[in-house]
Image (spheres, helix red, strand yellow):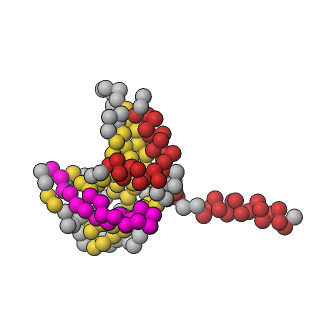
């Protein structure tokens, strides 16, 4: 009887300790005027691996994918507009390169951020999307004004399923 009780508790315990960051969801956006649909998939919201100081203490980030039937893009959204340093200024946007760790592989990746936007976009979207669907986790390094180097860790568990659902919306 004791063994049976243990077998019943183990799956329950595993379900309770599964990180919320492992959850990916998909959604649809429809333009009321044109009827055009966009599909999205995104990770759960996460905080920096080390707490940031005021005014960024409550900053959360999420990793995302979007498509509209013509284009696909990958991005990271933030609950507070990221105030990044070491960027190059262009007409209407900033660009920068930073380290991204896909599972155990570290590489330098290029991003863009439109002025005033709470999102940063992978410049090479197709490469990033391929990694989103094949890697298990990603760690992003950013140089944040007033906070120094900060890191955001995202689980990619179930990302490929959520991205497939978003893509299905865009093919219609």
Residue 85's x, y, as percent?
21, 67
Left or right side of 165 for 88? left
Residue 112's x, y, as percent?
24, 54
Relative to 114, does residue 8 appear above or below in the rendering? below
> What is the residue that sits farthest to the left in this orientation?
91
In the image, 58 versus 11, the foreground residue is: 11
- Which quadrant holds residue 68? top left
In the image, 50 versus 39, the foreground residue is: 39
Q: Which residues are magenta?
A: 92-110
Relative to 164, does residue 23 appear above or below in the rendering? below
Residue appearing at x 45%, y 44% in the figure: 163
- Which quadrant holds residue 89? bottom left
- Quadrant in which the C terminus appears: top left
Magenta stretch containing residue 93, yes or no?
A: yes
Asked if residue 137 shows in the view, the reply is yes
> What is the residue that sits farthest to the top in this orientation?
34
């Amino acid at each position: 009887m004791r063994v049976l009780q243990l077998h019943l508790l183990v799956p329950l315990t595993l379900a309770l300790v599964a990180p919320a960051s492992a959850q990916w969801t998909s959604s649809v956006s429809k333009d009321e005027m044109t009827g055009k649909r966009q599909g999205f998939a995104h990770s759960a919201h996460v905080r920096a691996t080390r707490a940031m100081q005021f005014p960024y203490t409550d900053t959360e980030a999420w990793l995302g994918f979007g498509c509209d039937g013509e284009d696909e893009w990958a991005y990271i959204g933030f609950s507070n507009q990221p105030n990044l340093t070491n960027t190059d200024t262009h007409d209407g946007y900033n660009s920068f390169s930073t380290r991204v760790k896909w599972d155990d592989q570290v590489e330098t990746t290029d991003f863009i951020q439109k002025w005033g936007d709470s999102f940063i976009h992978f410049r090479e979207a197709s490469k990033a999307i391929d990694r989103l669907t094949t890697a298990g986790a990603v760690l992003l390094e950013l140089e944040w004004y007033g906070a120094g180097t900060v890191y955001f860790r995202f689980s990619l568990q179930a990302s490929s399923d959520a991205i497939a659902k978003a893509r299905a919306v865009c093919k219609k």
